[in-house]
Image (tube, helix red, strand yellow):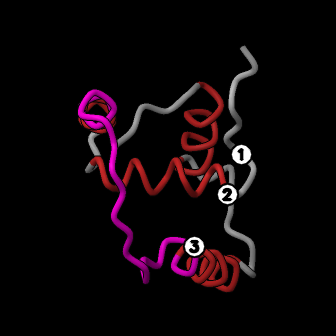
Amino acid sequence: MSKLDKEEKEILEAFESGKLKRTSRAKALQKRHQEYADAMFRKDARINIRLSSRDLRGLQKRALAEGIPYQTLIASVLHKYVEGRLRENGG
């Protein structure tokens, strides 16, 4: 499991101790969000790109550090860019 930050630990502890309860709509919300995730991560297209060996090694190292395949890392970076959540540094 990933490391949790302080706020996440507090939420988990509150849930496990019974202080937090699921809403009556929890199952419907979970289903809706699962459908969003499935649609977002559906891989239905293939591309081939050329990268420098240096960049590929760098991507592979970062992916290894994250514990994910490097192709998944590349897809994630591209997705974040397309969604406007990844921007080039000005400098």
Question: Is residue 15 found left or right of 88 in the rendered image?
Answer: left
Amino acid type at circle 1 is: Arg
Q: Nearer the viewer, residue 86 or 28?
A: 86
Query: x%, y% of residue 1?
Result: 34, 43
Label 1 crowding class (10 Å Cα cut-off): few <14, some 14-19, many 20+?
A: few
Q: Which residue carries the number 1 mark?
A: 85
Amino acid type at circle 2 is: Val
Task: Assign the C terminus to one quadrant of the image.
Answer: top right
Magenta range is 38-58
Q: Up-down: is 45 above or below 16?
A: below
Marking on residue 40: 3
> For the point 63% across and 42% down, which residue is it?
11
Q: Nearer the viewer, residue 8 or 55?
A: 55
Discs 2, 1 touching: Cβ within 8 Å: no
Q: Earlier in the sequence, mark 3 or mark 2?
A: 3
Cα gap from disc 3 to disc 1, whole angstroms? 15 Å
- From the image, state whether disc 2 or disc 1 is nearer to you: 2
- From the image, state whether disc 3 or disc 2 is nearer to you: 2
Question: Any magenta on residue 86?
Answer: no
Query: x%, y% of residue 50?
Result: 33, 50
Q: Which residue carries the number 2 mark?
A: 82
Q: Up-down: is 38 above or below 8?
A: below
Amino acid type at circle 3 is: Met
Cα gap from disc 3 to disc 2, whole angstroms? 12 Å
